[in-house]
Amino acid sequence: MSDYRTVQRGTSFLDGMAEQTIGSHPSSHPLRAQGSQPCEWHTAHLEWPEPQPLVARIEPEPYPLDALPPIIRAAVEEVQQFVQAPVPLVAASALTAISLAIQAHADVQRAERLTGPTSLFMLTIADSGERKTTCDGFFSSAIHAYQDRQVEQAKPLLKQYQAEQDAMEAKKSGIKDKLRQLAKEGKSTSPQEKELHDLESDAPEPPRVPRLLYSDVTPEALSYKLANQWPSAGLISSEAGIVFGAHGMGKESVMRNLSQINMLWDGGTLTIDRKTMDSFAVRGARLTVGLQVQEATLRETIERSGQLMRGTGFFARFLLAWPESTQGMRLFNDPPAHWPALEAFNRCITTLLEQEVPIDEVGALNPTTLAFSTEAKAEWRAYHDAIESELKSGGEFYDVRDVASKSADNAARLAALFQIFSEGMGVIGEAWFTSASRIAAWHLNESRRFFGELAMPAELAHAVRLERWLLAYCFRSQTDSVPTRIVQQSVTGISRDKDTISKAVMVLNEHGRARIIQDGKRRLIQINPALLAFATATHATSATNDANHATTVATVAPVAVANLSEEVMA
């Protein structure tokens, strides 16, 4: 019903644009009077102007799938061919599982006094229905199985703990009854007080049973679990709002949530002070995060929080992906009878999880520290310095300097994960850092794309998003125009209300990028053929992964800088 009203309200402006476009043709009025000519006839003599750039835009780069270690790459390709989700989303699910399996066992040393976790924070910006949950299910199946086995094995210990706890409570109850009686009689209660104190001191400790996967938990509740149940966990969800903050949450609460998540990425000690319950501290814990959020939700959250999410460094810690949707192009595939690559991947995950976790007597992790080889260290320095040189005012990464400043850290984490997953514990080789830096550079480009568009004025940003949707629709449907009815019912990325769509179409029309045309009683938004040709070429290029792209880390950062140069919007 609401979509229908939107269509009805939106027709007046689109009528006007159709009149203006068709009316500009010398013979437009006779054509309208006939009313039966096809759309092509109406526009056959209307020349398209050269499309003017809306903005200087950073083009998306193909995901460097060949940079993933062979076992990981094969599993990602196998799952992607069946699920048909965007490649970056599938890869993010795989990297999230690897991070969760390894983070308890290893830290990475970037330089002297620069040691940190190997945990990854992954954030994919995508609409509902992109099949993240399905992808997560494939790559986390071994983690679920491990967690279930641990719970089953711990049942005898849990029963014993419960029995000891019940016995202690019964003893405490008896001592307290005796203490109250003596106090009532005015007699000394010192022996009972000491007995109660000794009993509390000898209280049974609950067994630590691995709980690795969380999807619907607040940061504070998650921190409590890390401190008191198991010090390694993964927050994996296709609904990221619970992490970013609920709609009615105040800025103080949002700040507290973000700060807690930030501290867990850093691997530092996190102290939680509570008024009505016992305070606690999280020490030596590790957290992996794998989230999906809808673009509109993320934009609203950022606007609502002001500068908190950027200012606190929250987004800087994430490897962000903003892939093109594959919805509408996912023709049904029968599932394969066998999954050899995925099975090999999950066997590696199981092997990693079955290793003894280095936990001390207070429940904190003591991971092994991995260092770079001499060659890998030189490449890490080159990557770091190439990015650092572009953080200055006017530099390529100035507008995303918060994200760029942590890219070398994330590259080091990825390199450690690749080393351990592929070869086991050991010195991190140059080849693994080369691969890792390509992945990190790609995610840096994605952050710059997203935050660059986020900074646009609203009307211009709406025009950019509308054009992106129109181009994707035309590419999928092999057409050059989209009925206004379909736009107003189906467009994503912008509001479907009359005013927003009208202004966006006006901006595109003013820049010679799209126009309203008449096809009998139908009105359509037609795309400039020059843009369709560019979009087709872009899709064809993206379909082929460039195996020779940035093969050494010394070139990765400079190439990333060059690729982020401003280009005409297409």
Image: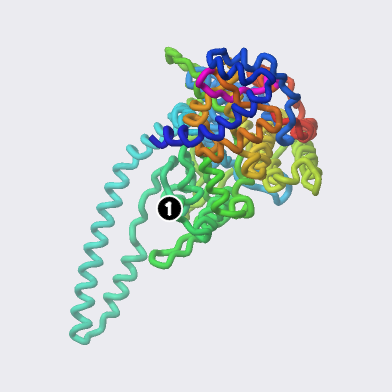
| The image quarter in which residue 191 lies | bottom left
Query: Is 529 included in the stretch rendered in magenta?
Result: yes
Q: Pick the residue in front: 162 or 114.
A: 114
| The image quarter in which residue 205 lies | bottom left
In the picture, the quarter occupied by the N terminus is: top left
Q: Position of residue 183 (x, y in %)?
A: 22, 82
Q: Which residue is drawn at 75% across and 46% down?
A: 398
Q: Evaluate whether residue 101 shows in this view.
A: yes
In the picture, the quarter occupied by the C terminus is: top right
Q: Is residue 344 left or right of residue 552?
A: left
The residue range painted magenta reads: 520-530
Kind of element beneath mark 1: helix
| The image quarter in which residue 38 lies | top right
Q: Which residue is drawn at 54% across and 52% down?
A: 304
Q: Position of residue 401 (x, y in %)?
A: 72, 47
Q: Where is residue 481 in the image (x, y as percent from the top left)?
A: 58, 20
Query: Is 374 included in the stretch rendered in magenta?
Result: no
Would you name the residue on which mark 1 appears? 221
- Rendering colour mode: rainbow
Kind of residue sitting beneath label 1: Ala
Q: Which residue is drawn at 49% across and 26% down?
A: 486
Task: Classify 10 Å Cα crowding around label 1: few (below 14), some (14-19), many (20 and above).
Answer: few
Q: Outermost residue toward the bottom?
A: 186
Q: Evaluate whether residue 97 shows in this view.
A: no
Q: Is residue 327 left or right of residue 112?
A: left
